[in-house]
């Protein structure tokens, strides 16, 4: 009998598996594509807050505002301006989302492609879930449906900020705007031709404000549930784009 020819399929399969493993485990590089992704997330966040405040009398992402109105409410001045219970729920779920996401990221590697794709996918599904609740129940104010929708929005928002924070792009937080406004206007190179931090802050603020306006008008025109679908679709786009990000090259 003739000699057995070594199979080439096993080494090829092993090589493909190793390549796929390295691709999924790769730490993502901070570049222009990542900045665009952060701006898309910011736009989606603006939509969510523009829906959550009129629907639930609190913010899903802007926890600075929630912290202030929580103090006002506990002092007995809530009136009909906001829902104290919803404010506390949103703040608690935002923190829970940040804690869980951040600690898992610490264990698995905060900038790994696979982790970021899974984390953003989970957040996206939560927003779609909130949209589904709104579509079926038209929830407003308080009650189980409203609290369920708000829980998903706030938890996803906290998870989003925590998931993208390890990239250390301080100018694009995807949620909080106060520091960005101040840092923008006090920048000593505000009018300079080349100023990357200023450009990032300006892009972040434009995306957040544009998302807020878009969310407000969509709520009136197509309803809260459809506006949240648009927000979730933006997050889904980011999730898919994460598959295209370049990986960080190891230091020589």
Image (tube, rainbow, N blue to C red):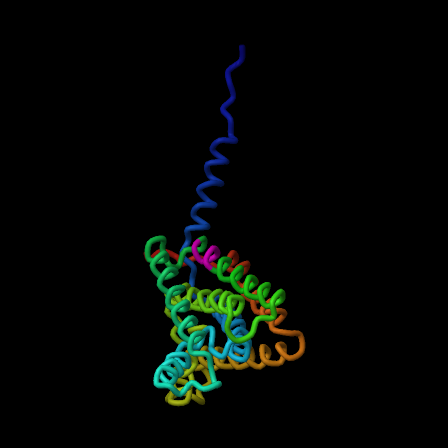
Residue 123 vs 138, above or below: the answer is above
7 left or right of 132 in image: left
Residue 212 % position (x, y): 54, 79
Where's residue 64, x and y in %? 39, 80
Nearest the viewer among 210 and 68 is 68
Query: Does the image show residue 235?
Result: yes
The residue located at (44%, 42%) in the rendering is: 18
Q: Is residue 32 visible?
A: no
Q: Which residues are magenta?
A: 115-119
Q: Position of residue 168 (x, y in %)?
A: 37, 69
Q: Quadrant of residue 221?
A: bottom right
Picture layout, residue 6 above or below residue 171: above
Q: In percent of the image, x 51 and y 62: which residue is there?
A: 126
Which residue sits at x=66%, y=74%? 222
State which quarter of the image contains the N terminus: top right
**Residue closer to the observer: 248 or 62:** 62
In the displayed image of the protein, which residue is found farthest to the right? 221
Q: Verify whether residue 86 appears in magenta.
A: no
Q: Which quadrant: the C terminus?
A: bottom left
């Amino acid at each position: 009998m003739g000699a057995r020819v070594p199979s080439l399929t096993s080494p090829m399969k092993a090589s493909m598996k190793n390549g796929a493993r390295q691709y999924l485990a790769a730490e993502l590089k901070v570049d222009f594509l990542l900045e665009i992704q952060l701006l898309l997330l910011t736009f989606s966040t603006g939509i969510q807050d523009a829906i959550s405040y009129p629907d639930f009398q609190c913010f899903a992402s802007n926890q600075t505002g929630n912290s202030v109105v929580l103090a006002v409410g506990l002092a007995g001045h809530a009136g009909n301006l906001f829902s104290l219970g919803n404010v506390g729920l949103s703040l608690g779920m935002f923190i829970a989302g940040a804690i869980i996401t951040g600690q898992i990221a610490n264990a698995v590697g905060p900038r790994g492609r696979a982790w970021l794709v899974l984390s953003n996918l989970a957040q996206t599904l939560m927003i779609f879930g909130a949209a589904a609740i709104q579509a079926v129940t038209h929830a407003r104010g308080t009650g189980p449906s409203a609290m369920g929708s708000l829980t998903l929005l706030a938890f996803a928002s906290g998870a989003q900020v925590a998931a993208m924070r390890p990239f250390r792009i301080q100018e694009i937080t995807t949620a909080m705007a106060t520091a960005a406004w101040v840092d923008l206007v006090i920048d000593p190179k505000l009018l300079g031709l080349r100023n990357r931090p200023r450009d990032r802050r300006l892009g972040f603020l434009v995306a957040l404000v544009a998302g807020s306006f878009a969310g407000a008008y969509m709520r009136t025109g197509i309803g809260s549930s459809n506006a949240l679908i648009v927000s979730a679709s933006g997050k889904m786009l980011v999730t898919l784009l994460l598959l295209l990000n370049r990986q960080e090259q190891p230091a020589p």
